[in-house]
């Protein structure tokens, strides 16, 4: 292995870069793997392209291939080689979005039961989807945030309109509440009574998974899927970046712009 004798010098070079010990070991290990593949071959452009094809066949993940390429590029630089590998561009995963039919069937699932738990779940899901709030915001809502006349939520100095379907579900839920608990959505014990605490983020995630599992076929639905669906539907209705920013409560226009282009 003609380059093995330079490995010691290369290790000293890496150490001079003042990188973390774990990163250093990672670079060294991957470099040794490259040199083992190279064996007695020289680092010609043809051999390096063969190595590139070898990585493509061996590793299915782009991130893994790119890690190997980054390491080898640094080794090539150390040897004053002009050749550099171009990194692969990860393919953008399409965002999961529910069709109108899937969304309707999902939101209707709690209505098949008349218990307080189901009535709460119906209001919760309708509000989570239609207001664009994140779970962390939803679970912290208090009953006093509701403006019954304007049918709005007054939250974080914002007025959030509650669409008619969500309002009907919310109004029904509040009429069934027989307690002085300030939280809008609370955990319910086995007897269906409200506990003192607001509902947890994990509980909301379980509620979503519960009703998604009742669909046929079963769909993988999580809070982000509902958020994607709302954003997609708003865009289909003509919403521009500023409208999406407002509806989904983005803090910056840049974040809303990036999301708008993904939908």
Image: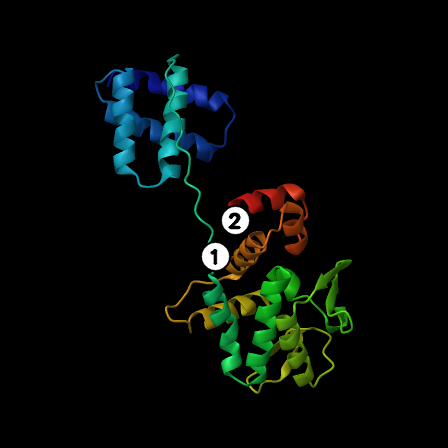
Provide the residue designation for mark 1: 97
Visual colour scheme: rainbow
In the rendered view, would you say 168 is above or below 133?
below
Q: Nearer the viewer, residue 223 or 130?
A: 130
Provide the residue designation for mark 2: 263
Q: Distance between the residues labelled 1 and 2?
A: 9 Å
- Does dot 2 land on a helix, a strand or a loop? loop
Q: Residue furthest front?
A: 238
Corner quadrant of residue 193: bottom right
Q: Residue at x 51, y 75 (%)?
A: 108
Q: Which of 14 and 118 is in front in this view?
A: 118
Count how many numbered circles sit on residues in the image. Answer: 2
Q: What x and y, as percent, mark residue 209?
A: 47, 68
Q: Can residue 43 be seen in this view?
A: no
Q: Which of 239 and 177 is in front in this view?
A: 239
- Does dot 1 land on a helix, a strand or a loop? loop
Q: Are marks 1 and 2 in contact (CB under 8 Å)?
A: yes
Corner quadrant of residue 237: bottom right
Q: What x and y, as percent, mark residue 6?
A: 34, 16
Q: Which residue is drawn at 55% across and 86% down?
A: 114
For the N terminus, the image quarter is top left
């Amino acid at each position: 292995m003609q380059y093995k004798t330079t490995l010691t010098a290369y290790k000293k070079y890496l150490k001079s870069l003042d990188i973390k010990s774990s990163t250093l070991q990672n670079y060294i290990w991957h470099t040794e793997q490259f040199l083992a593949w190279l064996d007695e071959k020289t680092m010609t452009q043809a051999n390096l392209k063969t190595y590139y094809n070898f990585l493509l066949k061996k590793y299915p993940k782009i991130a893994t291939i790119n890690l190997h390429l980054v390491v080898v590029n640094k080794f090539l630089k150390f040897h004053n080689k002009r050749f550099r590998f171009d990194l692969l561009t990860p393919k953008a995963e399409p965002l999961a979005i529910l069709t109108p039919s899937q969304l309707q069937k999902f939101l209707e699932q709690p209505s098949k039961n008349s218990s307080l738990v189901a009535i709460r779940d119906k209001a919760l899901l309708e509000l989570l989807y239609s207001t664009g709030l994140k779970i962390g915001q939803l679970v912290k809502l208090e009953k006093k945030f509701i403006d019954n006349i304007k049918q709005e939520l007054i939250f974080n100095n914002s007025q959030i309109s509650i669409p008619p379907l969500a309002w009907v579900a919310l109004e029904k839920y509040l009429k069934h509440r027989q307690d002085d608990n300030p939280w809008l959505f609370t955990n319910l014990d086995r007897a269906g009574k409200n506990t003192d605490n607001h509902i947890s983020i994990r509980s909301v995630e379980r509620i979503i998974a519960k009703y998604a599992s009742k669909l046929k076929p079963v769909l993988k639905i999580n809070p982000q899927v509902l958020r994607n669906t709302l954003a997609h539907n708003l865009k289909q209705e003509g919403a521009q970046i500023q409208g999406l920013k407002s509806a989904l409560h983005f803090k910056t226009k840049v974040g809303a712009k990036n999301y708008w282009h993904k939908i």
